[in-house]
Image (tube, grey):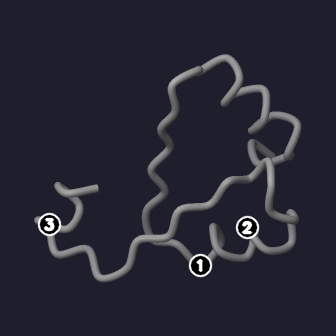
Amino acid sequence: MIRLKEESVAQLVIIDIASVPRGVWLQRLMESDVICVNGGNITHLMTRINKSGLVN
């Protein structure tokens, strides 16, 4: 996150798609210019992304 601030990113929003209703995070992602995905357990992260319908 520090590097993003160094690059003059105006706004940074962290969204947990597993705990926030789909209507909330989907709208935020649709309005985003850049989406950065990060996580410790890539298998779990991809499972959550697939279950959310985000890949479609």
Q: CA distance from mark 3 to mark 2?
A: 24 Å
Left or right of 14 on screen, residue 48: right
Label 3–label 2 contact, CB within 8 A:
no
- The quarter holding residue 45 reads top right
What residue do we see at 73% from left, 76% from top? Answer: 27
Counting residues from the start of the chain, the first of labels 1 and 2 encountered is 2
Label 1–label 2 contact, CB within 8 A:
no
Mark 3 belongs to which amino acid? Glu
Q: Which residue is mark 2?
A: 25
Point out which mark residue 31 bears.
1
What residue do we see at 86% from left, 72% from top? Answer: 23
What residue do we see at 50% from left, 43% from top? Answer: 37
24 vs 34, nearest the viewer: 24
Q: Which residue is mark 3?
A: 7
Seen in the picture, residue 31 relative to 3 is either above or below; the reply is: below
Mark 1 belongs to which amino acid? Glu
Counting residues from the start of the chain, the first of labels 3 and 1 encountered is 3
52 vs 15, nearest the viewer: 15
Mark in the foreground, 3 or 1: 3
For mark 1, give the secondary structure: loop
Mark in the foreground, 1 or 2: 2
Q: Quadrant of the N terminus?
A: bottom left
Point out which mark residue 40 bears.
none
Q: CA distance from mark 3 to mark 1?
A: 20 Å
Q: Residue furthest left?
A: 6
Mark 2 belongs to which amino acid? Trp
Counting residues from the start of the chain, the first of labels 3 and 2 encountered is 3
For mark 2, give the secondary structure: helix
Badge 3 crowding class, 10 Å Cα cut-off, few under 14, some 14 to 19, many 20 or more, is few
Q: Residue furthest bottom?
A: 10
For mark 3, give the secondary structure: loop
Residue 35 pos. (x, y %): 49, 56
